[in-house]
Image (cartoon, rainbow, N blue to C red):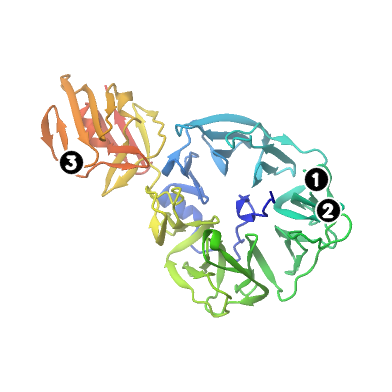
């Protein structure tokens, strides 16, 4: 079966974002102080205390990865990811079937970027070394990363699939890997990292986006992608020769998702070329627009992404705009619609984007099918930005409590998964097929306690007496969420909210 050159499968952690050409007056340090968030990505955040929080798939809101501290950077991958601590050491976390995190160490230091093209994942270190691992056939595990011999002084990595009729007219497919060296040259490999060859004509490269390279003089260079049944090159397909890309100059940053490309120039204008798209799923049609056009309806652009079928652009006045690429052709006067104001930065993935406002809060927009927005739901998508749930930690008698999914706040009240905490407080927890939760334990006065909560209707009894809850419990992705303070206090605990730490401290004698 023909292997599709599906560039959207590529996981890009360090190079897909367009580099900012303007720095907001509102500093990230100020926002971190306001929100407790030191840094973030499309599916993770790091708090100022060095804790790592992730969301997506089984985690509908930011959930702390237990056992990690002093984290300075993170690179989510398959069923987990890699975390770099302040001393440069690297740990891997993996999520098991129950949603819990399993930690292990990696024999590498100071990771600066990670690239993934299933089943192989590559990591580059600050020393310029490259490490590799391959995911198992079941897609769940991978062995420790090992260093690739014969490859050094690497600054960044890019990659994509290629296919062609080569070698006596027989169909072939391969992964092309590209390595930007610290001296500005680029090397490539198509034989699973066995050999490396230079890309001709490339020097002084500062950014590499698949088959496009940006040189420090602002020029853009490119080369053909082998993606058809007929060969585009003669001889060895590993030999690549770059040529200048016409129509662009004074470029400061690039974005390339494999079909659609964007560029920001020295005047902070936004350029487009590549594919527009119409239709969905199996009915998707791409129309190629090879000549770059500059947009007239937006200016002072500092950052941009392709998100699903939209361009999302951030401007110097802190406003995020979106324009659809669902068209037969992209017009220079395409309409950009305001998404969100007071935005200081944004991090995008192929189907969603996370934006940080000047007050430090995180907001999500786009596809949310797998809880990509950290909003606490699994609604397929949101056409308007939604606020991400705040990362709230919980301690019991000073010890951090691990959750398979984090705290969800609704109407000012905090809810937690049914089985995450109360059993640690000495209670017995049950949940029936008709979605009724039963918690039995000991009340503050040492008397027997039975709490029964219907998670559908909200009907609640305490020792048989009806009680009205301030907010109804709910079910998210099959997990029942119950009010933390109400049940904890019924079990005799003291519950304190520590806003400076975004922490709920529970004390139980």
- The residue pinned by badge 1 equals 191
Give how far across and how far down residue 172 sits, in percent: 78, 50
Badge number at residue 469: 3
Residue extending furthest left?
465
In-image side of 27 versus 178 (left or right): left
* Helix, strand or loop status at disc 1: loop
Badge number at residue 238: 2
* Helix, strand or loop status at disc 3: loop
The answer to whether 335 is drawn above or below residue 157 in the figure is: below
The answer to whether 495 is drawn above or below residue 390 in the figure is: above
- Please state which of residues 213 and 183 is positioned toward the viewer in this rendering: 213
- Please state which of residues 407 and 2 is positioned toward the viewer in this rendering: 2
Q: Quadrant of the C terminus?
A: top left
Per the model, the C-alpha gap separating discs 2 and 1 is 8 Å
Residue 146 figure quarter: top right
The residue at 84%/61% (across/down) is: 233
The residue at 61%/66% (across/down) is: 21
User: Of the residues under marks 2 and 1, which one precedes in the sequence?
Assistant: 1
């Amino acid at each position: 079966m023909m292997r599709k050159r599906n560039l959207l499968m590529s996981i890009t952690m360090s190079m897909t974002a367009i580099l900012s050409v303007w720095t907001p007056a509102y500093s990230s340090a100020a926002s971190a102080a306001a929100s407790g968030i030191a840094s973030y990505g499309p599916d993770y955040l790091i708090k100022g205390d060095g804790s790592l929080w992730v969301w997506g798939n089984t985690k509908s809101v930011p959930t702390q990865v237990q056992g990690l501290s002093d984290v300075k950077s993170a690179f989510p991958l398959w069923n987990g990811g890699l975390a770099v601590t302040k001393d440069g050491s690297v740990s891997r976390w993996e999520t098991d079937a129950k949603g819990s995190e399993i930690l292990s160490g990696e024999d590498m230091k100071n990771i600066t970027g990670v690239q993934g093209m299933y089943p192989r994942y590559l990591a580059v270190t600050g020393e310029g070394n490259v490490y590799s691992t391959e995911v198992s056939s079941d897609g769940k595990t991978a062995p420790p990363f090992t260093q690739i011999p014969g490859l050094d002084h690497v600054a960044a990595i890019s990659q994509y699939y290629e296919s062609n009729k080569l070698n006596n007219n027989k169909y072939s497919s391969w992964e092309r890997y590209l390595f930007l060296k610290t001296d500005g040259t680029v090397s490539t490999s198509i034989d699973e990292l066995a050999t490396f060859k230079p890309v001709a004509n490339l020097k002084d490269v500062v950014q590499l986006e698949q088959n496009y390279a940006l040189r420090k003089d602002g020029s853009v260079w490119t080369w053909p992608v082998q993606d058809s049944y007929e060969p585009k090159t003669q001889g060895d397909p590993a030999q690549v020769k770059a040529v200048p890309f016409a129509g662009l100059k004074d470029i400061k940053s690039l974005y390339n998702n494999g079909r659609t490309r964007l560029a920001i120039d020295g005047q902070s204008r936004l350029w487009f070329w590549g594919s527009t798209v119409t239709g969905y799923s199996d009915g998707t049609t791409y129309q190629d627009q090879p000549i770059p056009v500059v947009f007239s309806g937006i200016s002072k652009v500092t950052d941009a992404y392709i998100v699903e079928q939209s361009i999302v652009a951030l401007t110097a006045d802190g406003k995020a705009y979106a324009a659809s690429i669902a068209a037969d052709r992209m017009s220079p006067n395409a309409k950009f619609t305001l998404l969100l104001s007071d935005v200081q930065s944004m991090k995008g993935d192929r189907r969603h984007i996370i934006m940080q406002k000047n007050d430090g809060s995180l907001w999500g927009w786009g596809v949310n099918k797998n809880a990509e927005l950290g909003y606490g739901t699994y609604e397929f998508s949101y056409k308007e930005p939604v606020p991400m749930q705040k990362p709230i930690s919980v301690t019991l008698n000073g010890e951090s409590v691990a959750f398979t999914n984090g705290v969800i706040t609704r109407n000012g009240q905090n809810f937690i998964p049914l089985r995450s905490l109360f059993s640690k407080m000495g209670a017995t927890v049950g949940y029936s097929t008709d979605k009724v939760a039963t918690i039995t334990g000991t009340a503050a006065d040492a008397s027997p306690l039975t709490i029964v909560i219907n998670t559908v209707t909200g009907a609640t009894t305490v020792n048989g007496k009806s009680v009205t809850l301030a907010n109804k419990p709910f079910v998210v992705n099959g997990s029942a969420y119950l009010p933390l303070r109400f049940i904890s206090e019924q079990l005799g605990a003291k519950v304190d909210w520590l806003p400076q730490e975004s922490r709920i401290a529970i004390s139980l004698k």
